[in-house]
Image (tube, rainbow, N blue to C red):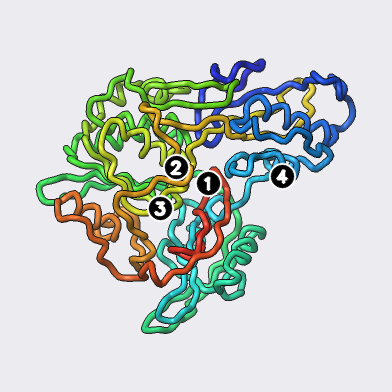
Amino acid sequence: MLLKRLLPLKNLKVLSLAAASSVIIYGCDKKGDGPVNPTGPPTNAEINKWILDSLKRYYYWTDNLPASPNTGQEPIPFFNSVKYSADRFSFINIPNGATSRKADSRSKYGFDYVVFKEPTTNHVLGLVTLVLNTSPAQGQGLRRGQYFNKINNTELTETNAAYLQSQLLSGSSVKLTAASFDTGSIKETGSITIPAGNTLEQTAVQKTFTVGSKKVGYLFFTAFLATDREAYLTVFNDFKTSGINDLILDLRYNAGGDVSAAAAMCSMIPVGITASSGFIEYKGNRNAGERNETFAEAATVSGGPSFTALQQRNLGLIRLYVLTTAATESAAELVINNLQPYLTVVQIGQTTRGKDEASITIADRRSAKRVDWVMYPIVYKILNSRGNGGYSAGITPAYSMVESAHLPLMNFGIETDPMIAATLRLIDGKGFSTSGSGLSNNSLRSTSQTQTAEIFNSAVSAFSAPLLKDH
């Protein structure tokens, strides 16, 4: 929501972990170091003062802001210079223009990939892990599980993988050379040229499996969108009608999103919650303070289904299975952490990204607008109803499993997908086993981590299993 005037942050409604609320910032001149109503084109000093004044009031790490930063810089270098060193997610941009946010292959082309060394040949290959519906990548025939050995005609190696990633993200299109490997040899099978373009459609898969005498619901999706809350009613009504005993949320490539969407889904899972059951705590700086919201309050922000409608579809579960990778973040991590007070969350996969924070949107909407830039600073740390959080290093799974160590990759929702199969065996009381074909973790090496975009990230980078992830 856009406020007509500056309000104490505790009165703002947090809508999303990526962009929580909108705040209008008016110019001010408390120290007399500039005109109250400047004229002419805005200078870097004026813009940067607006940035700094806003951060001093709202920023979670306000006490770590430098005392006398160089306001003569361009806005992006200035913003990056004053951010706290541990802040991975705050950014600034001009809508449809310059941005401090790093690009990623998902938001640019509609696919995620990892890079690994194939142990029998020592060749370095790219592996497509996700292709979004209606994306440019899907339109050109790219599919999950596909391999490639070249980016823009340059062969992938351990030393150039990060450089080629930057080249992939800097152009208006990318050419991938498709490849296959079999009996110790790599064979090029053609090329795919993908134009850059936006993808807004949700990618989701819903299934019901039968395991022994149990029915197991399964849901894969890539983001929590407020516009999907009505669709959740249909999905969970199907699960409830089917009489499922357990539920698998496949959040392997879920980049998070809207708090109300996450709260709405969470409201339909555990046994025993009511409208007054605590869901989330926001902990901010001295101006923001602390805020708490119940399931009903968090789930029904800005419309959407009523809490009564959500409760009518509640599955009454005492246990939830969640599949994760290093690409699982933000609102997806919130689901894991904030349901723990109400049921047993069994996490299978890899440690998550580690975004236990919420940001707000800060813009200048004066009638005589001076600043075109919009800021998305981190303002809150996120906790569950017991006050537990602090997962900036990620949430560690109870059962460790790396999907790229079990090749070939299968489509989401396939019962024989190694991660799904391992979870179903666990549900069936047969214990946890990661048996499968593909790469062993020992065959994979590690490289430095690369930060990537926040809202539609396609994976964190790390040569460890695998060599490099674009996310």
In terms of depth relative to the viewer, which is nearer, 157 or 441?
A: 441
**The quarter of the displayed image where residue 23 is located:** top right
Q: Residue at x 69, y 27 (%)?
A: 54
Mark 4 lies on residue: 98
For disc 2, the neighbor class at 10 Å (few under 14, some 14 to 19, many from 20) is many
Q: Name the element at disc 1.
A: loop
Q: Amino acid at mark 3?
A: Thr
Q: Is residue 471 left or right of residue 271?
A: right
Q: Earlier in the sequence, mark 4 or mark 1?
A: 4
Image spot of residue 277 (x, y percent): 32, 21
Q: Which of labels 3 and 2 is toward the front?
A: 3
Alpha carbon distance from label 3 to label 2:
14 Å
Mark 1 lies on residue: 456
Mark 2 lies on residue: 223
**Do we see residue 167 in this rendering?**
yes
Q: Which of labels 4 and 3 is toward the front?
A: 3
Q: Earlier in the sequence, mark 3 or mark 2?
A: 2
Q: Name the element at disc 4.
A: loop
Q: Residue furthest left?
A: 213
Q: Residue furthest right?
A: 40
